[in-house]
Structure formats: structure tokens, C-alpha cells
Amino acid sequence: MKISRYKGGKDLLAADMASFRLIESAFRQACLSWGYEEVRTPTIEYLHLFTSAGTLTGMGGAGRGWHCGRRALFRRPACT
């Protein structure tokens, strides 16, 4: 059996967002009713937090970089 690599989900466009928010809201309410609380991880991180630990090695330059003063920022990869 051949196992193919997951290429990621598709982007949600403006026309898709009303349906997505409705489903997301129902899921969120169900989770809250079961006692779960929301946790959100940062989307933007300082680059040095990942390069000093070597966690970006072999990820093909994941993320996109910006500079904020003297520190580099990047979009955190979804797999972290």
C-alpha cells in the first residue's frame, strides 16, 4: 500500500466562511458542554525560539519571515 503525504487543507474563501463559522460554533459549544476549554497557540513566533532548538531543520524553510526591530518573526508551522 502506498501512503501519500498530506498536502494540507484548502483555504477557506469568503463564501465559505459563514458555513465554517456555523460548524465551528456548534463544535465549540459541544466541547464547552463537555467541560473542555479553548487553548490557542501563537501563530507568530520569534524565529530564534525554533532555530536555536533546531526544530526547523528539515522542514524546507517552513513559515514566512518578517522583521520586528532587531528580531526576526515567522509564521509558526502547523506541525508544532
Image (cartoon, rainbow, N blue to C red):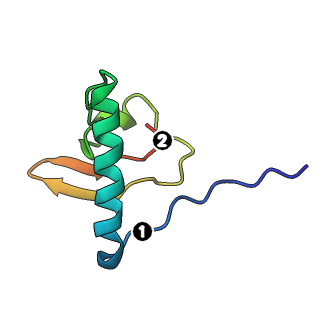
Residue type at the position of mark 2: Cys
- Residue with the mark numbered 2: 79
Nearer the camera: disc 1 or disc 2: 1
- Residue 53, can we see it? yes
Of residues 26 and 42, the one drawn nearer to the viewer in this rendering: 26
* Residue 20, horizontal then vertical, whole percent: 35, 61
For the C terminus, give its image quadrant: top left
In the figure, residue 27 lies in which quadrant? top left
Which residue is depicted at the point 18% across and 56% down?
67
| Residue positioned 57% across, 44% down in the render | 58
Q: What's the mark number on residue 44?
A: none
Say which element carries label 2.
loop
Looking at this rendering, what residue extends furthest in the top direction?
35
**Residue 54, percent across and down?**
46, 33
Instruction: Specify the farthest residue to the bottom.
Output: 15
**In the rendered image, is residue 75 in sight?**
no
Instruction: Classify residue 34 by image quadrant.
Output: top left
Gap between marks 1 and 2, in whole Å?
17 Å
The furthest residue to the right: 1
Q: Residues within 10 Å of mark 2 (few under 14, many from 20)?
A: few
Q: Position of residue 3 (x, y in %)?
A: 80, 50
Depicted 20 relative to depicted 47: above or below: below
Q: Which numbered tag is attached to residue 11?
A: 1
Q: Amino acid at mark 1?
A: Asp
Image side of residue 67 versus residue 76, left or right: left
Tell me what residue is drawn at x 32 percent, y 78 percent: 15
Number of numbered discs: 2
